[in-house]
Image: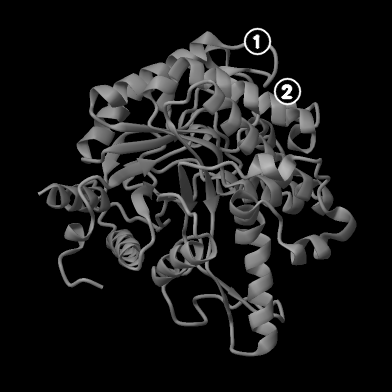
């Protein structure tokens, strides 16, 4: 890698941001006509959330929008990635639209523009309207078409002011954690349903891109995948084969349809009768050209054929509060692998990257999160390394702007570069926020 300072390894047009999602920060769960989401419902299940919390208030971003926009601007970023809550815009996911919900996102987008910050909006960051779930949710092919209607409606109102529009955030999580493992909303445990859900998510992405472009899209259009580099635990042939299969089930199950128009044969064979129903023309619809690919990366995956947990602690490597190994080289490896496997790869943005740590608040209210600073610095260097190896990198966004509702972990895990006091909801930038701001100031020169 070049020996020049890290900030000098990125071009002037590079996109730097922070990221959040609607359910995790907005709160206002019942305000101004918002409908119920599958996460609102899931939080009511006993034992579903580690601290028995919910997203009713979260960070109350809905009522603190201007303050939070000023906070984002103070970091010196040039982009903000957020998501639109479908049930805030269309309470049931079908039928009538909610003008007050759209008004909120219009204020958000306009507020970003006024501050010179690019708006990166995600249409589905997991909070499907409960009204659609009751009609079959993502397992029902009709939801594909309801999503396309929703995408078109949002674009008609906001599309002229959105720089990047993402269809889905991490479809693997929706399908696998939500419909196979059942530890995320809607809490279903069925491999067959999960496989069908994954197909419908990809299909709705492709059909939405077709419709948005037909409607005259001005935004860059793409999807965000959570990806990990899968490495064998040992050099034994069975571990190497297990790692290749894990990569096929995870990365390639989503990326191959998008870039090659087919599912990996070995995964289809493994699924057997549980493989999704694919109608004629579906794969062609999924493989729409994209303006960008978003990659969410947190850690690599070490795979053993024995199924043994080859944890980072056993290997003597640092871990985050999620017990995820800190291994920035895994991001470089993943990005280079994508570039090798998909020669037509569009510009790539790291749309989420960050670490949960047990932040210690000192007497002066200051959080000195040196481990998070090291994590961010290491992964930004990993992006620079991938760029120098020819990967078309275009941006990097920190997860997360602020501490928030971390899904099944509730409020127990803190990913923010801004500390949130959940009693007062006061926001206090951590040392990592100052480091990121100073880094971006140096990059601007």
Question: Is residue 239 placed above or below 122 in the rendered structure?
Answer: below
Q: Is residue 27 left or right of residue 186?
A: left
Residue at x-position 27% and y-position 47%: 14
| Earlier residue among tags 2 and 1 | 1
Disc number placed over residue 88 in the picture, else none: none
Residue that sits furthest to the right in the current view: 273
| Viewer-proximal residue among 89 and 394 | 394
Residue at x-position 29% and y-position 65%: 381
| 2 vs 1, front mark | 1
**Which quadrant, please, contains the N terminus?**
bottom left
Question: Is residue 194 placed above or below 108 in the rendered structure?
Answer: below
Residue at the spot of label 2: 131
Mark 2 to mark 1: distance in Å? 12 Å
How many numbered badges does the structure rendering display? Answer: 2
Q: Secondary structure at mark 2?
A: helix
Q: Residues within 10 Å of mark 1 (few under 14, many from 20)?
A: few
């Amino acid at each position: 890698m070049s020996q020049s300072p890290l900030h000098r390894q990125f071009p002037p047009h590079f996109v730097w941001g922070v990221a959040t999602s609607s359910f995790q920060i907005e709160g206002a769960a019942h305000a101004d006509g918002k409908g119920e989401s599958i996460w609102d419902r899931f939080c009511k299940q006993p034992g579903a959330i580690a601290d028995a919390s919910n997203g009713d208030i979260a960070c109350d971003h809905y009522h603190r929008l201007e303050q939070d926009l000023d906070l984002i601007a103070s970091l010196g970023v040039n982009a903000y990635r957020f998501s639109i809550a479908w049930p805030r815009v269309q309470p049931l996911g079908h039928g009538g639209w909610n003008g007050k919900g759209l008004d909120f996102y219009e204020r958000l987008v306009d507020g970003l523009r006024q501050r010179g910050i690019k708006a990166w909006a995600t249409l589905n960051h997991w909070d499907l309207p409960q009204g659609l779930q009751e009609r079959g949710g993502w397992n029902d092919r009709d939801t594909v078409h309801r999503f396309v209607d929703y995408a078109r409606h949002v674009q008609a109102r906001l599309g002229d002011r959105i720089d990047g529009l993402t269809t889905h955030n991490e479809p693997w999580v929706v399908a696998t954690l939500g419909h196979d493992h059942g530890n995320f909303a809607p809490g279903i445990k069925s491999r067959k349903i999960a496989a069908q859900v994954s197909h419908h998510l990809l299909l709705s992405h492709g059909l939405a891109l077709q419709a948005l472009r037909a409607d005259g899209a001005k935004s860059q259009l793409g999807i965000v995948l959570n990806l990990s580099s899968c490495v064998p635990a040992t050099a034994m042939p069975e571990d190497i084969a297990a790692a290749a299969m894990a990569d096929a089930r995870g990365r390639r199950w989503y990326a191959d349809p998008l870039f090659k128009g087919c599912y990996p044969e070995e995964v289809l064979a493994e699924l057997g009768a549980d493989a999704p129903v694919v109608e004629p023309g579906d794969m062609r619809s999924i493989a729409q050209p994209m303006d960008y690919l978003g990659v969410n990366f947190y850690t690599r995956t070490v795979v053993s054929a024995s199924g043994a947990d080859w944890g980072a602690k056993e290997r003597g490597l640092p871990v985050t509060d999620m017990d995820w190994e800190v291994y920035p080289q895994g991001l470089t490896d993943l990005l280079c692998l994508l570039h090798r496997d998909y020669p037509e790869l569009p510009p790539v943005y790291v749309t989420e990257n960050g670490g949960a740590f047990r932040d210690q608040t000192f007497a002066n209210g200051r959080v000195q999160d040196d481990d998070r600073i090291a994590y961010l610095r290491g992964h930004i260097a990993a992006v620079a390394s991938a760029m120098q190896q020819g990967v078309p990198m275009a941006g990097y966004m920190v997860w997360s702007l602020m501490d928030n509702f971390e899904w099944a972990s509730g409020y127990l895990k803190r990913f923010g570069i801004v500390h949130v006091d959940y009693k007062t909801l006061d926001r206090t930038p951590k040392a990592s926020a100052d480091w990121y701001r100073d880094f971006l100031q140096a990059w601007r020169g």
